[in-house]
Image (cartoon, rainbow, N blue to C red):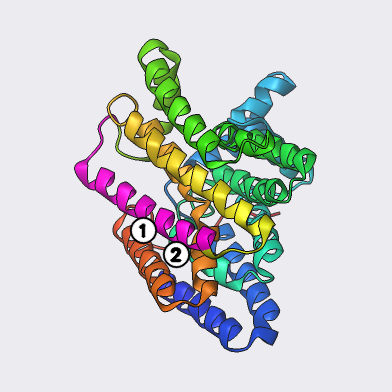
């Protein structure tokens, strides 16, 4: 019931923002606060206990500063926890502050492109919110910085892109994959032939390297906990391909009709990320399925820009396809193991 109320209220706020554009800012702000509190005050999720343990291990650590930081797995997240502790805040502040940082960064990126963030934030709730802000908090924060980096790259502000990308990687190392996929645009190799060669060569190289280096197995061991374990189901493969196909189709439609150079460049970057994600997923399906799924899910998160763009396009066909995608994505979330019975935390914030 808590989830139904949350999504229902978010939908109403988004509809009001659509019907009354002058209220979009207020509706978006209310939705942002609501989403932060819903994730930040939760008392249960798949990774909740792991983060509580991480907080306490850092709190009681007698190791060196560097070793203590890496208890947080990624350096900037470890520093965030240490900063929270230095401010005298409790363990629940980690969840509340993480949700606030991640969603605020994403709202900033959405506003930069669409002029408001109520609609893309609602799409986020339907697609990645329960996987990221509600569960994998480090990825959520990293994606917030990566979204801002995407905007900077589309505007050719390369130094700002570099700063945001390194911040993203500091919160989750998997963001290095995003950095690599965006390199052609940094180097201005963004014509169709160059991008096709980059993607084809990169995926072929990944396939070759995955046979050679045992390091891949170590990375896979860390990421395989998220989905599929050591094997890949046919259902998971079909679902990933269907999701990718929808976003690629919408992306191509947006690219065909876009007249603004900066936004056209953004759609092109999103298209490369999406194709790279599904390509890595297929290449690694037999060798490191956990890693392959994680990379595909990471790249797929950038699809929120494409889905939002398709909805704002207000074409019946693209709007309908985007709406069906959101409903289907939320149905998958609802059928997954992510939505544990909602309960408020009993942990201290301060």
Q: Residue furthest left?
A: 234
Residue 34's quadrant in the figure? Answer: bottom right
Give the CA distance from mark 1 to mark 2: 8 Å
Asked if residue 77 can be seen in this view, the reply is no
Q: Position of residue 57 (x, y in %)?
A: 60, 31
Pinpoint residue 177: horizontal percent, then vertical percent: 54, 33
Mark 1 neighbour density, 10 Å: few (under 14) some (14–19) many (20 or more) = some
Q: Which one is earlier in the sequence, the residue at label 1 or at label 2?
A: 2
- Judging from the image, what secondary structure is the residue with disc 2 in? helix
Magenta-drawn segment: 230-256
x and y percentages locating residue 90 in the rendered image: 67, 49
> Left of 319 or right of it: where is 101?
right
Which residue occupies 37% across, 22% down? 207
In the displayed structure, 28 sits above or below 66; it is below
Q: Is residue 78 left or right of residue 293?
A: right
For the stretch drawn in magenta, the main secondary structure is helix
Q: Quadrant of residue 77?
A: top right
Category of crowding for the residue at label 2, using alpha-carbon neighbours closer than 10 angstroms: few (below 14), some (14–19), many (at least 20):
many
Residue name at image x 58 percent, y 42 percent:
138
Residue where numbered disc 1 is placed = 333
Q: Residue at x 74, y 46 (%)?
A: 156
* Disc sitting over residue 126 in the figure: 2
Is 295 magenta? The answer is no
Looking at the image, which is closer to me, 202 or 189? 189
Query: 251 above or below 58?
Result: below
Please say if the residues under marks 1 and 2 sit with CB atoms less than 8 Å apart. yes
């Amino acid at each position: 019931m808590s989830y139904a109320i949350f999504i229902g209220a978010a939908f109403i706020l988004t509809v009001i923002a659509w019907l009354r554009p002058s209220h979009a800012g207020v509706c978006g702000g209310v939705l942002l606060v609501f989403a932060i509190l819903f994730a930040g005050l939760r008392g249960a999720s798949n990774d909740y206990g792991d983060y509580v343990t991480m907080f306490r291990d850092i709190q009681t650590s007698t190791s060196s500063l560097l070793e203590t930081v890496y208890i947080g797995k990624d350096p900037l997240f470890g520093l965030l926890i240490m900063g929270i502790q230095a401010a005298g805040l409790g363990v629940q502040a980690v969840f509340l502050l993480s949700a606030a940082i991640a969603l605020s960064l994403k709202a900033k990126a959405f506003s930069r492109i669409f002029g408001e963030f109520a609609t893309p934030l609602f799409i986020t709730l339907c697609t990645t919110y329960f996987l990221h802000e509600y569960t994998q908090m480090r990825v959520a924060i990293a994606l917030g910085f990566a979204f801002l980096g995407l905007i900077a790259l589309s505007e050719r502000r390369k130094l700002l892109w570099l700063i945001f990308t390194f911040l993203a990687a500091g919160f989750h190392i998997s963001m290095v994959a995003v950095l690599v996929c965006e390199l052609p645009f940094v180097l201005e190799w963004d014509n169709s032939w160059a991008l096709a060669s980059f993607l084809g060569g990169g995926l072929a190289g990944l396939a070759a390297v995955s046979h050679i280096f045992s390091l891949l197995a170590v990375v896979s061991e860390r990421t395989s906990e998220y989905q599929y374990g050591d094997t890949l189901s046919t259902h998971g493969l079909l679902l990933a391909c269907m999701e990718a196909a929808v976003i690629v189709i919408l992306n191509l439609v947006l690219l065909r009709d876009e007249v603004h150079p900066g936004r056209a460049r953004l759609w092109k970057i999103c298209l490369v990320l999406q194709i790279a994600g599904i390509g890595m997923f297929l290449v690694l399906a037999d060798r490191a399925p956990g890693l392959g799924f994680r990379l595909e899910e990471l790249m797929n998160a950038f699809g929120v820009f494409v889905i939002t763009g398709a909805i704002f396009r207000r074409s019946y066909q693209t709007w309908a396809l985007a709406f069906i995608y959101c409903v289907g994505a939320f149905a998958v979330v609802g059928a997954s193991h992510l939505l544990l019975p909602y309960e408020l935390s009993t942990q201290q914030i301060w």
